[in-house]
Image: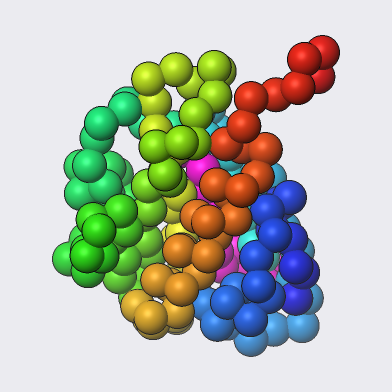
Amino acid sequence: MPASLCGITVEPALVKAVLPGGDSLTSATQKPNGGTIRCNLYVDDKLVLSLAQAWWSEGKATAAVAPAYPGTKDGTMSEDERFIYSGQAGVGRTLPSCKTSEHPEQDLYIVVETRDSGIDDPEAIEKLLTAYTKAVEGSAACREPAAGS
């Protein structure tokens, strides 16, 4: 298991818990639009897990963003209302301090979605979602780019 998923460091055991068995694991980064970076994980060349960083209008509640990701339907909301998750998917809002001038007046959300993997484990999804959200908060995604970069 890699310790880094498309540049974001996360505990391999948390990732392994939401992956089906297989022989090979590969990952690829996608940027479907200007506000989203998606990290796709493939087991034996089959897409099984997608982790996304997506910018949404500031002030939206996690519950308002979650319907865009069907896997979170009927999910469980965390006490602080930052996270909503089911056995297959989850959405989490980064801390308000996560800001960049590239995305003014927007909040960064983290999305974890399994893809036809047979996984149905809300606890494992919650652990990966919260850990990955914290890792993104500590990464360059939540900081201004250095001058000249």
Instruction: Give the percent coordinates (x, y) of residue 30.
Output: 64, 40
Residue lying at the far right of the rendered structure: 148
> Furthest residue to the left?
74
Residue 80's place in the image compared with 139, above or below, is below
Magenta stretch?
A: 43-54
Q: Is residue 9 magenta?
A: no
Position of residue 94 measured from the top left corner of the image (x, y, whole percent): 43, 45
- Picture quarter containing residue 90? bottom left
Q: Is residue 23 left or right of residue 74?
A: right
Q: Position of residue 120 (x, y in %)?
A: 38, 81
Quadrant of the drawing holding the N terminus: bottom right
Q: Is residue 67 visible?
A: no
Residue 29, by quadrant, is top right
Taking the spot 42% from the left edge, 44% from the top edge, the residue there is: 95
For the point 55% across and 18% down, the residue is 102
Q: Residue furthest top?
A: 148
* Most common secondary structure along the magenta stretch: strand
Q: Quadrant of the C terminus?
A: top right
Please tell me which residue is depicted at 53% across the width and 65% down the height of the picture: 131
70 vs 110, nearest the viewer: 110
Residue farthest front in this picture? 97
Q: Is residue 23 left or right of residue 107?
A: right
Name the spot of residue 3 as percent of width and height, x first.
75, 68
Identify the residue at image location x=38%, y=64%.
89
Towards the viewer: 38 or 124: 124
